[in-house]
Image (spheres, rainbow, N blue to C red):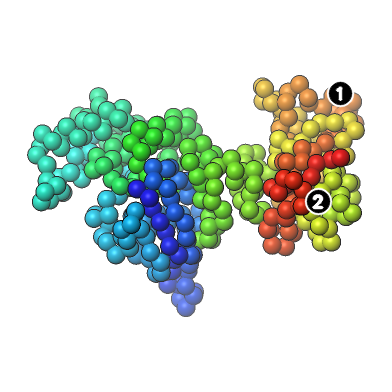
């Protein structure tokens, strides 16, 4: 089911001292979610992603705009008639019911031509329980299940009515790290098996990038960028998106461009086609550094952290903004030699396609005139 949001806006009245000032939780959200895709709504806490999900579900009414499922406008249709399945952050399972009863519960509320016999409801519940791999847990109550098992019961309950759209509101936030990894793989497997259009809300960029067909990055209720995860990572629209995506985070420097050269801390570190004349922010992905004894960028070496296949070189630089240190990720075979370690200075060459320039005031992306419009030209 294709989902279209047309200039969707939600305002809430101000509270307390800000009574007269409205809060815009979702601001002019306008895009289409293709049929059968898993979309990740991604952003920091308070950015409006859960509000957007509740608007799509029908738990909230928009202040402005429209919501369409396919060709049908559902803006004014009650939540129970939209054909959506919702999985809440806290699972919201009924503690006095067993797994089978929890899954069947939505089917018991069907009326008219949709009403099912007890045998038909059980058959549907067993079918979806098989899909999420909890068939052997049907007689247990929620208190007897692990967090991951409860999550799968919640998904089964949302799927049993064969919803047109599946909505997941930070479904992994209550799980430990290892279980989160396993459960997100399960969510992706289930979504691909059912082909149901799915919207997944999270503040964890690693989760969103690992399972989503596309991600929607939000800030303060405004969509910053939409695209396939790797495309958004490689080609962020602004500094916020660049900093939000990536682990370790991108390294940001105060810099300037003069005579076709990018200068960081007064050192010309590479050629660029970006126009000069004003301060810029140079953002370098951790994998964009190469240890090079003759490299143009010199940094104070703090530590070398061995991670097995890779090494994290931790450095300091006076032009660094935000984070106190630079974290570069390099191959273990290319780590700083003994001379660099003794001197306390490490020099880097930079991979041009991993270096991004942004306007120092607005944070908007600066693009050069070179062949690769995403970045700027490499060294000659």
Disc 2 to disc 1, how far (Cα)? 36 Å
Number of on-image labels: 2
Local secondary structure at mark 1: helix
Circle 1 packing at 10 Å, graded few (<14), some (14-19), many (20+), is few
Label 2–label 1 contact, CB within 8 A: no
Q: Nearer the viewer, mark 2 or mark 1?
A: 2
User: Residue at coordinates 28% horizontally, 37% vertically from top-left?
Assistant: 156
Q: Which callout, 2 or 1, points at the residue further toward the start of the chain?
A: 2
The extreme bottom residue here reads 20
Q: Which residue matches tag 2? A: 273
Q: Quadrant of the C terminus?
A: top right
Q: Name the disc covering residue 184, or none.
A: none
Front position in the image: 92 or 34: 34
Q: Is residue 89 visible?
A: no
Q: Could you say where residue 304 lies in the image, as x and y percent from the top left?
A: 75, 29
Image-based side of 115 in relation to 294, left or right:
left
Q: Could you say where residue 121 lies in the image, as x and y percent from the top left?
A: 15, 37
Height in image: 235 above or below 178? below
Res. 120 image quadrant: top left
């Amino acid at each position: 089911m294709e989902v279209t949001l047309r200039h969707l806006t939600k305002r809430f009245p101000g509270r307390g001292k800000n009574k007269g000032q409205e809060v815009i939780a979702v601001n002019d959200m306008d895009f289409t979610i293709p049929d059968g895709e898993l979309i990740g709504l991604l952003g920091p806490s308070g950015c409006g992603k859960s509000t957007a999900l509740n608007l799509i579900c029908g738990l909230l009414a928009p202040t402005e705009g429209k919501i369409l499922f396919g060709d049908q406008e559902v803006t004014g249709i009650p939540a129970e008639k939209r054909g959506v399945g919702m999985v809440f952050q806290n699972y919201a399972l009924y503690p006095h019911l067993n797994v089978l009863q929890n899954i069947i519960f939505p089917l018991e509320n069907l009326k008219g031509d949709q009403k099912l016999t007890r045998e038909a409801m059980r058959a549907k519940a067993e079918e979806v329980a098989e899909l999420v791999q909890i068939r052997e847990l049907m007689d247990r109550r929620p208190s007897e299940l692990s967090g991951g098992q409860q999550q799968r019961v919640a998904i089964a309950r949302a799927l049993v009515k064969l919803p047109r759209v599946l909505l997941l509101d930070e479904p992994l936030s209550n799980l430990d790290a290892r279980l989160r990894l396993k459960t997100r793989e399960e969510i992706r497997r289930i979504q691909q098996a059912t082909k149901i259009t799915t919207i997944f809300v999270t503040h964890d960029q690693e989760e969103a990038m690992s399972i989503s067909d596309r991600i929607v990055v939000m800030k303060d209720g405004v969509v910053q960028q939409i695209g396939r995860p790797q495309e958004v990572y490689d080609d962020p629209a602004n500094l916020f998106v660049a900093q939000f995506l990536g682990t370790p985070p991108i390294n940001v420097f105060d810099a300037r461009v003069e005579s076709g050269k990018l200068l960081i801390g007064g050192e010309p570190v590479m050629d660029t086609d970006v126009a000069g004349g004003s301060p810029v922010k140079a953002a370098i992905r951790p994998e964009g550094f190469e240890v090079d004894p003759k490299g143009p960028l010199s940094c104070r070496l703090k530590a070398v952290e061995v991670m097995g296949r890779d090494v994290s070189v931790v450095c300091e630089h006076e032009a660094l903004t935000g984070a106190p240190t630079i974290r570069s990720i390099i191959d273990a075979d290319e780590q700083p030699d003994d001379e660099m370690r003794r001197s306390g200075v490490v020099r880097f060459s930079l991979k041009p396609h991993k270096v991004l320039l942004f306007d120092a005031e607005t944070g908007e992306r600066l693009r050069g005139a070179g062949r690769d419009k995403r970045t700027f030209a490499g060294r000659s």
